Image: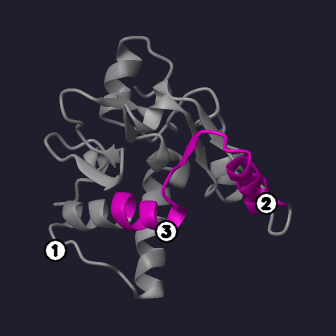
Amino acid sequence: MNNDENMLTEQGDFVEIAAGIGYGTPPAAGWIPIADCPLLIVVGVTGVGKSTTIDALRAREMPFTMLPDRRVLTDDLIIARLQRADGVPVAQERDRARRFAYTRRFRERFPGGMAHALAHLQIGESAAAGQLIFDGLLGENEVGARRPIAAVGPLCGAACTGHCARTAAAGAQRCF
């Protein structure tokens, strides 16, 4: 049975994908929703200076944590979760057509695409101590979402269920 609705919030299924960055049900202490962290999303077309800007921040020794890149989040947050929802073994998907099929299915279910996945990250307290930076949003559905996804705190699109439905019923205006 396909269980897309809860694939990003399954209980007892916390995965740390990089030091201090994970998703799923977090351990009892030491992890906070990304919505409660300062997050800068760097957006721009190729050649506009995104990497140069991030390198300049490093050169000035500004304290920040880079979130995992888009490919890591796609592999660990989107494809692996869809594989689990389908009841198939989690495996690295290298076939381009199958990768696109997985990401297309995710975007159909969650129109915000990567922005929706990003909104479900949990951050370890040590990583959350400074500025978080992500530079992997693409396309109008992610960057120009109907509502701000991560600039002021993640807000899932209309297709979000699970935790968002519970918080919406309680009158909350964001996912967490």
Categorize mark 2 by other alpha carbons within 10 Å: few (<14), some (14-19), many (20+): few
Q: Secondary structure at mark 2?
A: helix
Q: Is residue 107 left or right of residue 75?
A: right
Horizontal side of 109 relative to 90 (left or right) equals right
Earlier residue among tags 2 and 3 = 2
Callout 1 amino acid:
Pro
What is the x, y in percent for residue 35? 48, 29
Q: Is residue 68 magenta?
A: yes
In the picture, the disc for residue 78 is: none
For discs 2 and 3, the disc positioned in front in the rendered view: 2
Q: Quadrant of residue 135?
A: bottom right
Q: Residue 92 falls in which quadrant of the image?
A: bottom left
Q: Find residue 87 and report its horizontal and vertical position in percent.
A: 15, 67
Residue 155 x/y as whole percent: 53, 31
The Cα–Cα distance between marks 2 and 3, rounded to whole angstroms, is 20 Å
Q: N-terminal of the two: label 1 or label 2?
A: 2
The residue singled out by tag 1 in the image is: 89
**Element under disc 1:** loop
Q: Please provide the residue range marked out in magenta.
A: 49-78
**Is residue 112 shown to the viewer in this render?**
no
Which amino acid is tagged 2?
A: Thr
* Circle nearer the viewer, 1 or 2: 2
Dot 3 crowding, Cα within 10 Å, few <14, some 14–19, many 20+: few
User: What is the three-letter code of the residue carrying label 3?
Assistant: Arg
The total number of labels drawn is 3
Residue marked by disc 3: 71
N-terminal-most mark, 1 or 3: 3
Mark sitting on residue 52: 2
Which of the image's four quarters has the N terminus?
Answer: bottom left
Q: Nearer the viewer, residue 169 or 135?
A: 135
> At 63% across and 50% down in the image, what residue appears?
142
Judged by its main secondary structure, the magenta piece is: helix
